[in-house]
Image (cartoon, rainbow, N blue to C red):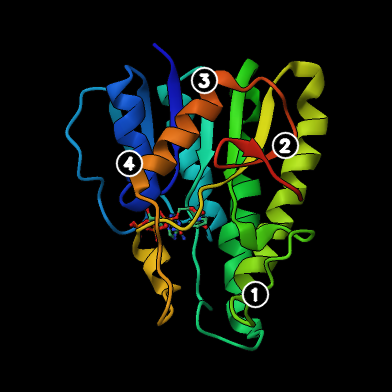
């Protein structure tokens, strides 16, 4: 049986992704912060940790290593959006966002590297807001979130390069605008999210199970610009 770690599996895209992989016969190690994972399944292992706290991450890594000698996929999905309605860059929010969306992901991933083998896939959940080249600076909001996702994209590129000799695949994936707690925090008077968490989960499943090319940024099943 293949094993996948999905961070932030308690709700939103992470929960839908956990359901998808369980339905496809995978063992899922799902993490959460405050909300326990609302699933009952013999193949689900739930682990609590705080991605902004290095001690908490280290404990989760110990639990994961006790549970599974190897990991076939890691979905770095847990993340926060604190400044969806801010039109300035608030340094307090930027610092907190970087801790969770960048530093915590790096801390967790680096401690798990020995568990990956040829063909294992690491997916970093990203966003159109993380693209520097795309003409998406369509409003003034979310400075900290955009900066964190752009930094996470560089981690994808850097890690893909480092793990290439081992045959471990590393990808960024933007799920589109999705109907989750986070998705609805960016709603405007004229626009709202148009994708379901299940559609995003399908994209993640397709990427993990079919794509062998490393170091790319994917959106809606196609490569997109960094
Ligand atoms: N929704 C969108 O439209 C959209 C668009 C582009 C990219 N994304 C990306 O997709 C990913 C998932 O988004 P979502 O919309 O599903 O978000 P969400 O509904 O807000 O869920 C966030 C998840 O992250 C966990 N989490 C938050 N802070 C954490 C921390 N400090 N430590 C550990 N876990 C933490 C939460 O756990 P608890 O439930 O326990 O609090 C929850 O499971 C994120 O990386 C997001 O940036 C989303």
Mark 1, ligand 1, within 8 Å: the answer is: no
Local packing at callout 3 (Cα closer than 10 Å; few below 14, some 14-19, many 20+) is few
> Mark on residue 138?
1
Local packing at callout 4 (Cα closer than 10 Å; few below 14, some 14-19, many 20+) is many
What secondary structure is found at the residue carrying circle 1? Answer: loop
Q: Residue furthest left?
A: 40
Label 2, on which residue? 216
- Please say if the residues under marks 2 and 1 sit with CB atoms less than 8 Å apart: no
> Mark on residue 16?
4
Q: Earlier in the sequence, mark 3 or mark 4?
A: 4
Task: Give how far apart the Cα atoms at labels 1 and 4 are.
Answer: 29 Å
Local packing at callout 1 (Cα closer than 10 Å; few below 14, some 14-19, many 20+) is few
Q: In this image, 40 relative to 211: left or right? A: left
What secondary structure is found at the residue carrying circle 2? Answer: strand
Could you tell me if residue 70 is visible in this image? yes
Residue 189 position within the rendered picture, expressed as x and y whole percent measured from the top left: 40, 82
Q: In this image, 189 relative to 71: left or right? A: left
């Amino acid at each position: 049986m293949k094993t996948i770690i999905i961070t932030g599996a308690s709700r939103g895209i992470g929960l839908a992704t956990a359901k998808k992989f369980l339905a496809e016969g995978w063992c899922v190690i799902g993490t959460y912060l405050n909300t326990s994972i609302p699933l009952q399944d013999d193949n689900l292992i739930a682990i609590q940790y705080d991605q902004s706290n290095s001690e908490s991450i280290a404990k989760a890594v110990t639990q994961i290593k006790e549970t599974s000698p190897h990991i076939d996929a890691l979905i770095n999905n847990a993340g926060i959006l604190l400044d969806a309605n801010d039109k300035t860059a608030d340094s307090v929010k930027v610092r907190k966002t970087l801790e969770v969306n960048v530093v915590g992901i790096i801390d967790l991933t680096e401690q798990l590297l020995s568990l990956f083998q040829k063909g294992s896939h690491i997916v970093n959940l990203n966003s159109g807001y993380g693209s520097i080249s795309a003409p998406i600076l369509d409003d003034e909001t979310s400075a900290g979130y955009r900066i964190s996702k752009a930094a996470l994209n560089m981690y994808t590129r850097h890690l893909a390069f480092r793990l290439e000799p081992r045959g471990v695949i590393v990808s960024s994936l933007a799920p589109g605008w999705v109907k989750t707690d986070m998705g609805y925090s960016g709603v405007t008077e004229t626009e709202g999210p148009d994708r379901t968490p299940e559609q995003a989960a399908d994209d993640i499943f397709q990427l993990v199970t079919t794509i062998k090319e490393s170091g790319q940024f994917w959106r809606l099943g196609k490569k997109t610009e960094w």
